[in-house]
Image (tube, helix red, strand yellow):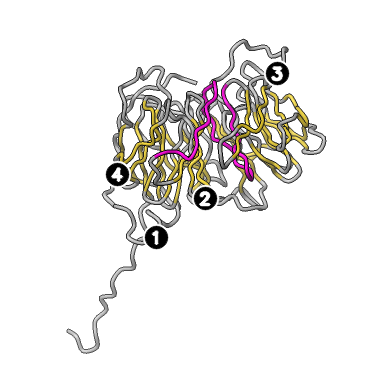
């Protein structure tokens, strides 16, 4: 992945629309090409753009945006219609995870390794659990447990009510791993039945017993220079679909863990499921799913048949830089590049519908893009939060037909 740098917004149409008067802000569908809405810089002292990467994707909740910043010890609360900071939830280190909201409580971690349960609107967390290593992946929630994976290949389960440690799994890495270095990241734990699925830097996928953290099974998947598994596995039918950073993307039979198909491409994010009879938009990811959309570390987005592994189409960003997770919308797949732009790709054909032209100063987007209603919000590696809006539906034109007897 190339080193990100700061860039300016240019050549985009701005809108001045505020939040909706009724219902959710910007209610409606992300069903067309968006327009630039606003931009706001995250607070904190400047960082060298050659090494500055923002990993925390934003969370849209009602009129607010919750987002972390690489150089600010807090989870920030922004106005959704302007990007203005209205609150700071103080933490022990920068937050580089997307918060998870459940039953009015935000669950998130910071780069000091502390995990928080923070009720919406509260001045302090309900609990905060410290650990030794940075956490940059979203937590997983399962019943009474909060599941956390850190960058040192450790997964823990915390009591959801108290934050007490319930169990801890430290992965013993495969000594045959060829690369001496590992990527700065971790897989968000996936709960499937009685298993917690986690990926590790040696390319292994491990099924842990949800009750006690004991290993139920393990499968080596990742290959190449960086076999790290950073994207959580996705359950599809009788398969788990999972990829490693360098390669490959595979479908594993859930019962035998045998590889049913593979695609020789890698990525940093979970694949996205969508479509039914054809690769059509699936904003809510409603099944039955036939297609897998895979964001590649090589800058290519692939549409793969979930049953056979056959590649239906490949879209190339042309940058060679890693892509963010694709976000399915009614207008197509919204995807960012660490090379500096954001794209809208037709789900059925793989053709590019729209590209954000950020200007002359290169930067990039590494964090996940958030979409709700007609609004999309992203965070650039330069620490700039940017909002886009799909214009509201046009109102019917007034009927100016002449009245009977009028001249």
Name the secondary structure under disc 4: loop
What residue appears at the point 34 percent right and 32 percent down from the top-left corner? 384
- Left or right side of 281 for 207: right
Residue 345, magenta (yes or no): no
Q: CA distance from mark 2 to mark 1?
A: 19 Å
Sequence-wise first label, 4 or 3:
4
Callout 3–callout 1 Cβ contact below 8 Å: no
Dot 2 or dot 1: first in sequence order is 1
Q: Which residue is mark 1?
A: 23
Element marked by disc 3: loop
Tell me the crowding category of disc 3: few under 14, some 14 to 19, or many 20 or more residues within 10 angstroms, Cα based: few
Residue sitting at x 32%, y 53%: 19
**Quarter occupied by residue 347:** top right
- Magenta span: 124-151
Q: Earlier in the sequence, mark 2 or mark 3?
A: 2
Tell me, yes or no, whether the two marked residues, 2 and 4, touch with CB atoms within 8 Å: no
Query: Foreground mark, 2 or 4?
Result: 2
Give the spatial CA distance, label 4 vs label 1: 18 Å
Q: Residue at x 34, y 57 (%)?
A: 20
Q: Going from the N terminus, do you reach mark 4 or mark 1 first? A: 1
* Crowding near the residue tagged with mark 4, few <14, some 14–19, many ≥20 C-alpha atoms within 10 Å: some
Element marked by disc 1? loop
Report which residue position mark 2 lands on. Answer: 103
Q: Mark 4 = which residue?
A: 82
Q: Nearer the viewer, mark 2 or mark 3?
A: 2
Residue 203: give x, y in percent of width and height.
67, 23
Give the main secondary structure of the magenta stretch: loop
Residue on which disc 3 sits: 172
User: Total label count?
Assistant: 4
Tell me the residue at 55%/41% (across/down).
350
């Amino acid at each position: 992945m190339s080193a990100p740098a700061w860039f300016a917004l240019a050549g985009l149409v701005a809108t001045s629309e505020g939040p909706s008067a009724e219902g959710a802000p910007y209610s409606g569908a992300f069903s067309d090409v968006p327009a630039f809405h606003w931009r706001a810089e995250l607070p904190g002292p400047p960082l060298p753009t050659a090494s500055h990467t923002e990993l925390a994707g934003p969370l849209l909740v009602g009129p607010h945006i919750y987002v972390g910043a690489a150089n600010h010890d807090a989870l920030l609360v922004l106005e959704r219609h302007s990007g203005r900071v209205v609150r700071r939830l103080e933490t022990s280190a920068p937050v580089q995870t997307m918060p998870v909201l459940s039953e009015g409580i935000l669950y998130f971690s910071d780069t000091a390794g502390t995990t928080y349960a923070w009720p919406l609107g509260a001045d302090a967390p309900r609990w905060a659990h410290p650990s030794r290593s940075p956490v940059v992946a979203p937590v997983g929630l399962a019943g009474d447990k909060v599941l956390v994976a850190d960058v040192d290949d450790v997964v823990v389960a915390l009591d959801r009510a108290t934050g007490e440690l319930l169990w801890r799994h430290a992965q013993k890495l495969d000594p045959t791993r060829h690369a001496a270095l590992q990527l700065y990241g971790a897989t968000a734990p996936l709960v499937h039945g009685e298993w917690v699925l986690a990926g590790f830097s040696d390319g292994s996928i491990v099924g842990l017993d949800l009750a006690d953290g004991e290993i139920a099974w393990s499968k080596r998947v990742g290959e190449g220079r960086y076999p790290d598994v950073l994207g959580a596995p996705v359950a599809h039918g009788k398969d788990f679909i999972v990829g490693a950073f360098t390669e490959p993307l595979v479908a594993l039979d859930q019962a035998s863990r045998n590889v049913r198909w593979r695609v020789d491409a890698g990525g940093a994010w979970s694949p996205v499921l969508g479509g039914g009879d054809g690769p059509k938009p699936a904003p809510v990811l409603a099944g039955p799913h036939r297609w897998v959309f895979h964001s590649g570390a090589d800058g290519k987005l692939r549409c793969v048949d979930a049953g056979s592994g056959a590649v239906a189409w490949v879209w190339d960003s042309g940058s060679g830089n890693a892509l963010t997770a694709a976000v399915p919308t009614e207008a197509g797949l919204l995807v960012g590049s660490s090379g500096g732009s954001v794209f809208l790709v037709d789900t059925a054909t793989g053709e590019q519908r729209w590209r954000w032209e950020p200007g002359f100063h290169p930067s990039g987007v590494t964090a996940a893009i958030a979409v709700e209603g007609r609004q999309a919000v992203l965070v650039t590696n330069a620490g700039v939060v940017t909002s886009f809006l799909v214009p509201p539906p046009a109102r019917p034109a007034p009927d100016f037909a002449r009245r009977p007897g009028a001249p």
